[in-house]
Amino acid sequence: MEAASGSRTHSECNPKCDWTEVGEFDALTVDLSGLGFKKEELKVLVDTSRKLTISGERALRDGQWRRFLRSFQLPKHCNIRELGAKFDQEILYVILPKPTNEMKQSGGVLKALSKRRLILTGVAAIVLVAGLGAFAAYKLTRS
C-alpha cells in the first residue's frame, strides 16, 4: 500500500510478529528480514495505557519511503518499566519481564544487574530458538 505525504511517497509494510512466553518473561519478535531497516530507524514505545507501539521508517530513493506501524495491548502481568529491546540480524526482540518475587518484595524495581541478566538471557534464548529454526529450515530444504 502506498500513501503520499507532501513530496514523500510511503510504501507500507507489515512485518511478521510473534509472541513467545518463556518462564520469567514474554518476548515479541518482529521479523524485518529483507526490509533494510537499521536500528536507528526503529522506535519502540509504551504508553500509560500499556499499549506497545513499534514503528520504523526509512528512505528508499527518489522521495520514496518504507514504513510500518504495529501496536499491541500488553498483558497486565508484564513489567513495562523493565522492557528491553534488541535489534540483531534484521530481527527486533522486545523483552517484557514478568514480576518476580524479588520485584514484588522491592516494590516493583529490579536491581540493574538482575534486569540486565534477565534481558540478556531472554534475548539469548530467542536468538537460539530462531537460529535453530533457521538451521532446521535450511536442512529441510537441502534434503
Image (cartoon, grey):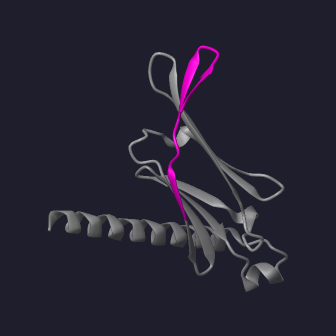
Q: Quadrant of residue 52?
A: bottom right
Give the farthest residue toward the front: 1
Q: Which contiguous range is marked in magenta?
A: 1-18
Q: Nearer the viewer, residue 50 or 113?
A: 50
Q: Is residue 10 above or below residue 53?
A: above
Q: Residue shown at 48%/40% (left/top)?
A: 38
Q: Quadrant of the C terminus?
A: bottom left
Above or below for 25 versus 94: below
Residue 135, image x and y in percent?
Answer: 28, 67
Residue at point 63%, 60% (across, down): 84
**To which quarter of the image does residue 82 belong?**
bottom right
Q: Is residue 12 magenta?
A: yes
Main secondary structure found in the magenta portion:
strand
How many labels were placed on the picture? 0
Against 137, residue 31 (above or below) is above
Q: Position of residue 3 (x, y in %)?
A: 59, 26
Please tell me whether residue 21 belongs to the stretch shown in magenta: no
* Residue 98, image x, y percentages: 69, 75
Left or right of residue 138, residue 23 in this image: right
Q: Is residue 13 left or right of residue 80?
A: left
Q: Percent position (x, y) of residue 75? A: 73, 69
Front residue of 45/17: it is: 17
